[in-house]
Amino acid sequence: MNNLCTDVGYLSVNKYGEQLCGDHVDIVEQDENSLVMVLADGLGSGVKASILSTLTSKIISTMLANQMSIEDCVTTVASTLPVCEKRGIAYSTFTILHIVDNKTAEVIQYDNPHVIFLHNGTSCEYSKINMTIGDKSIYKSRIELSPGDILVAMSDGAVYAGVGKALNFGWQRQNIIEFLEAVYDKSYSAKMISTILMEQCCQLYENLPGDDTTVAAIKIRKREPINLLIGPPSNPADVKKMMTLFFAKEGKHIVCGGTTSALAAKYLGKEIYTELDYVDPEIPPISKIEGVNLVTEGVITINRVLSYAKNYVTDNTCNTEWSLQEDGASLIAKLLFEEATDINFYVGRAINPAHQNPELPINFSIKMRLIDELAECLKKMGKKVNVSYF
């Protein structure tokens, strides 16, 4: 196992007026350091396109999950996909990104816009080998990757953005490359890159997409552990054990909750300094403890983080709410969603007497549920999550 990981993020929007998306993305993790992402684009839009793209991506990902070679998968799909008699094109196109050991990308492309490869924020060309399988022209590439490298795949809805509206001939691949180079920030996650590119596509479509559009990004990252502590242990005798394990963990440390913060400060032998300004009127101010990266209030703040997380794993429309703010919930969201690759929760099971007031909508079970739901959302983001209870 190396100290790298593959960060994956994607977004899709339906053609205006359609209930289903004609594009489909499937991700298969082969082992700790290797995965396959398949982006399929069904012909047309609506139900038929959705079925065709889903079948294509499922067939490829299922075969790969059963240890069949990419060549066998492509041969099977390319040989079985029919060609539309009227249009003379396949009923589904696809892009396959196979990341091996977080260091190499095997790229298979059939009739989708070619994958964009960014190294240090600059587009780099890569060699393509043309193979003919049946009557279909398939492009195969092998790219050596370094930490920070980004691969961006897309359906043709991205290059058609703006046709007849903002642009005469759509948003060509070269235009997309120039846009990605202009907005590049080395701190952006794969999901944020996909979000920014998709937002631009929607603007060019004037929020009335003329085609199903999907953007999928893969970024090679060094592992970044983040540790979050919330709630004192059910047994007061376990405070030292809990704090020792928490602060011994590599990475940044977040402490949530008033009582928990006091225990952490006492363990570290430091003072707590609480800020008085409410950046967000609904989120309590943060505090500061020397040796802790972030100190926030507990349940109210985590509840807001959970709402951001639920949105993040869907269409990520709330990203500007937390990515540009400095309240406690936004700061936690930025650390967990964008920076962290491995997240360790340390959750105390002690019952807070203040939460037993029947007039308050907070109780012990709610706190546990918040952490469980947040952990599930983070797993959907591709994070490695571990939850320890005390």
Image (cartoon, grey):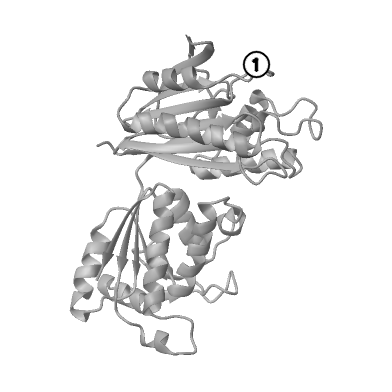
66 sits left or right of 236 in the view:
right
Give the tally of numbered discs: 1
- Residue neighbourhood size for the residue with mark 1, other residues' Cα within 10 Å, grouped as few (<14), some (14–19), many (≥20): few
Q: Look at the image and tell me whether residue 297 can be seen.
A: no
At x 33% / y 33%, what residue is drawn? 65
16 sits left or right of 372 in the view:
right
226 relative to 5, above or below: below
Quadrant in which residue 64 is drawn: top left
Location of the C terminus by quadrant is bottom left
At x 51% / y 73%, what residue is drawn? 285
At x 41% / y 54%, what residue is drawn? 378
At x 45% / y 68%, what residue is drawn? 302
- Of residue 52 and residue 158, the one placed in the foreground of this image is 52
Residue 260: percent from the left, percent from the top? 34, 75
Q: Look at the image and tell me whether residue 67 can be seen.
A: yes
148 sits left or right of 12 in the view:
left
In the picture of the structure, the residue carrying the numbered disc 1 is: 88
**Disc 1 element:** loop
348 relative to 34, above or below: below
150 relative to 344, above or below: above
